[in-house]
Amino acid sequence: MAKGKPDLSNTAIRIFLHRVGTAYDAAREFQPFKTSGPEWEKARQYFDNGCAYCGVKLDADAVVQDHLIPINKESLGLHAWGNVVPSCAKCNKVKHHREWTAFLEEVCDAKDYLPIMKRIKGFMQKYRYSHGTDLGPIAVNLYEDIGELCMTLIELRIKQAKLLIDKQITTAVGGRD
């Protein structure tokens, strides 16, 4: 559950990047990438139903969806074809919010690094996923706008709640006499 202004703003950024991903897919003439159904199955099949990072085979209930370029305000990856890959829970947890290249540099043996790198780059190229869209200024504005707007609305509702509480207390105190 969101606990404050940054949580609310980060949620808005994720929604924004999901929806921009849908527009990006449409511009590349793809159906919107969905995390269930044939789109996800194609992504899994590309990696032979294994983890994109370590290659371990994954049952449908053990696979985790990971964004190569994270969908957050720093990285600005999109929820779109070519950016969502299957991952095992271990790799997903260790990778966390980092981009895939930094993660691979840290965890791969020298002999495994180049083949894994080529395979992931091939996946991104197959779906023409390019991380060149400069969404930074838009995302920064959205982050700040949503935070301010939400906090203004929350403060308004707190004032309403306080009035209601004061009324209930006054009624309860008045009823005791």
Image (cartoon, grey):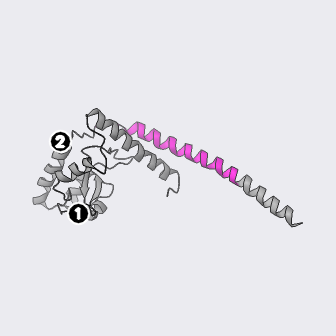
Above-or-below relation of 131 to 92: above
Q: Quadrant of residue 136?
A: top left
**Sequence-first disc among 1 and 2:** 1
Above-or-below relation of 26 to 93: above
Rounded to the nearest angstrom, the CA distance separating label 1 from label 2 is 24 Å
Which residue is depicted at the point 29% across and 55% down? 65
Going by the numbered disc 2, the residue's amino acid type is Lys
Q: Which secondary structure is most common in the magenta stretch? A: helix
Q: Label 2, on which residue?
A: 126
Task: List x then y, in percent, for residue 79.
Answer: 32, 45
Q: Label 1, on which residue?
A: 59
Task: List x then y, in percent, for residue 139.
Answer: 42, 40
Q: Residue furthest right?
A: 177
Residue 173 is one of the magenta-drawn residues: no
Q: Is residue 83 shown left or right of residue 142?
A: left
Region of the chain picked out in magenta, as a range: 132-161
Q: Residue furthest front?
A: 37
Alpha-carbon neighbours of circle 2 within 10 Å: few (<14), some, or many (≥20)? few
Q: Is residue 5 shown left or right of residue 87?
A: right
The residue lying toward the viewer, choosing from 50 and 108, is 50
